[in-house]
Amino acid sequence: MRSKTRLLWMHLHSYIACFFLPIALLYLATGLVYMLGYEGEESELLHQPFTLENKTWPIDEAKVKAELEPFIKENKLGPFPTDFYNEEGKWLSWYSYKGAITLFPTEDPGEYTLEVIEHDFWKSLLLIHKSYAGPFFWYLSFAFGLSLLFSLTSGLIIAIASKKFRSNSLISLVIGCATLLLAYLLGN
């Protein structure tokens, strides 16, 4: 590989790595903390009965949200999360990495339990790690994945292009592949 081309690869490798280092550290820290069994804490801001105009289990998320939003705003329970999940017949939940608003049915038609929770710092970071943080973090995480692939590939290209590092780099690559295969075969 020519010197100018190798220098270009090294610059791209360096700048992209520096840009994505903060999110890499975030994923590293949250992944390790999660692997050690800590999932963060939740604070229950509200847990109370709530009556909706519709007496049957709500199926229209927009109508239910329109009824809940004024109550949430009036009671200063935070911004209404944008992501939505419907576990049919069990709950409706709007969530983000900062907290969640969930509506549970009761045995009485039209009577529900409204729960509002807030996540602590570690729980919110863990939810960012798990991609529950909205589109901005999703795109940033996707770009980070691509940058990681680019950084590893460019590092391999730079190493193989150098006669001094070529044989040891290829040996290391083979050992890495064999380790991954062995881990897969020995896993449960």
Image: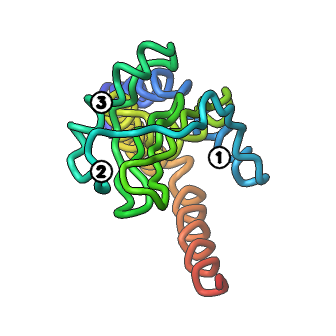
**Amino acid type for the residue under numbered disc 1:** Gly
x and y percentages locating residue 37 in the rendered image: 77, 53
Amino acid at pointer 2: Lys
> Residue at 29% of width from left, 55% of height from top?
56
- The residue that mark 1 highlights is 31
Look at mark 2 in the image and give the residue it sits on: 55
Judged by depth in the image, the label closer to the viewer, 3 or 2, is 2
Q: Position of residue 165 (x, y in %)?
A: 56, 49
Q: Is residue 15 left or right of residue 176?
A: left
- What is the secondary structure assignment of the residue under circle 1? helix
Name the side, left or right, on which 167 lies relative to 108: right
Quarter where residue 61 is shown: top left
Q: Residues within 10 Å of mark 1 (few under 14, many from 20)?
A: some
Quarter occupied by residue 124: top right
User: Tag 3: residue type?
Assistant: Glu
The colour scheme applied to this rendered structure is rainbow
Going from N to C along the chain, the mark reached first, 2 or 1, is 1
Q: CA distance from mark 1 to mark 3?
A: 37 Å
Q: What residue did someone put label 3 on?
A: 67
Front residue (pair 166, 140): 140
Which residue shows up at 31% across the image and 33% down it?
135
Q: Secondary structure at mark 2?
A: loop
* CA distance for labels 2 and 1: 43 Å
Q: Nearer the viewer, residue 65 or 28?
A: 65
Give percent across and percent down for residue 127: 54, 40
- Where is the C terminus found, in terms of image quarters? bottom right
Mark with earlier residue (3, 2): 2
Disc with the residue nearer the chain's start (1 vs 3):
1
